[in-house]
Image: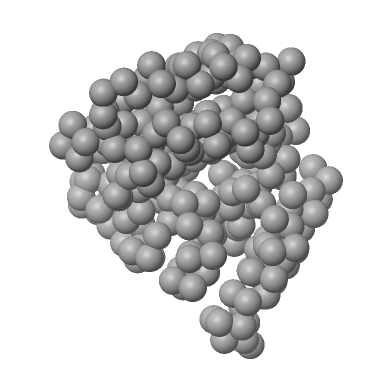
Amino acid sequence: MSQYILKIDCQDEKGLIYRISDAVFKHRLNIVKNDEFVDKEHGKFFMRAELSGEINKDEFLGTLEAILPNRANIYVGLKDKKNIVLMATKESHVLGDILLKHYRNELNANILAVISNYDDLKQLVEKFEIPFFHIAHEAVSREEHEEKILSKLQELKPDFIVLAKYMRILSSNFVENYKETIINIHHSFLPAFIGANPYKQAYERGVKIIGATAHFVNNNLDEGPIIAQDVITVNHEFDWKDMQRAGRNVEKVVLSTALDLALEDRIFVHKNKTVIF
């Protein structure tokens, strides 16, 4: 018996849960788990259901479209592993963590490849028998470099792209090709620090909290819809290298959490926020 994920978001109105449940029953499906949420401020209804049974996907979608409000977003997909591509530069901590999870069969995904603008991590990646593509950015324009990456991505056809500390800003053209598909991780201090060596800046400022944020990438740097966040406390006994090690551990956990949520189809994006079941 097949397992499916059903996701619906639409304008809220009376009787939606009844109508959706009736459609599921008529198509001889069983609801294994179900979550709903109504954003009262915007009048939006969100629902995620895990279903079991066998369906004709087109017929089921047609039934749902007929009973839901206009412009409803409907997703029906098999509860199965998704395909991802990792993009990296030189830092290995989050990339290595994801590769280890994949090796231990703890990642609900197939890693199609790792793409990097440097070849520093090639040996690490190849130890896990994952294809590694070095697409150098030197001696070419930003546009030419991105075109080469886009060409490789179009060949690989990933469901998600994970920026595992990929340290180049993506253009709006690149992002538009993979809207709500690119997941990024970055440090987040209170207050925030940007530029070279943020952990040293944080140490010099006497920061007491450090953390990380995982989000979908949009055209505003580090301002896309947030998927997961976490913080830890630090004190005067931490030097900047201690802070860096602690921050990298948080980055690993937060990116892993965000990736799991995406792979399990638990995320809805509404405006610049997320609803997560």
> Which residue occupies the foreground of this view, 31 or 261?
31
Question: Which quadrant does the N terminus fall into?
Answer: top right
**Is residue 134 toward the left or the right of residue 58 in the image?**
right
> Where is residue 172 shown, x and y percent of the image?
44, 71
> Where is residue 137 shown, x and y percent of the image?
62, 78
Residue at the spot x=63%, y=38% of the render? 58
Residue at the spot x=31%, y=25% of the render? 37
User: Where, by quadrant of the figure, is residue 131 drawn?
Assistant: bottom right
Identity of the residue furthest to the left in this view? 41
Residue 31 seen: yes
Residue 108 seen: no
Residue 214, above or below 27: below
Q: How is the image coloured?
A: one colour
Question: Which quadrant does the C terminus fall into?
Answer: top left
Residue 124, above or below 167: above
> Which residue occupies the foreground of this view, 200 or 87?
87
Residue 208, above or below 2: below
Residue at the spot x=79%, y=42% of the render? 128
User: Where, by quadrant of the figure, is residue 34 drawn?
Assistant: top left
**Is residue 277 toward the left or the right of residue 76 in the image?**
left
**Is residue 34 toward the left or the right of residue 225 in the image?**
right
> Where is residue 75 shown, x and y percent of the image?
53, 37
> Which residue occupies the foreground of this view, 56 or 10?
56
> Where is residue 179 shown, x and y percent of the image?
48, 57
Residue at the spot x=54%, y=65% of the render? 177
User: Where, by quadrant of the figure, is residue 110 drawn?
Assistant: top right
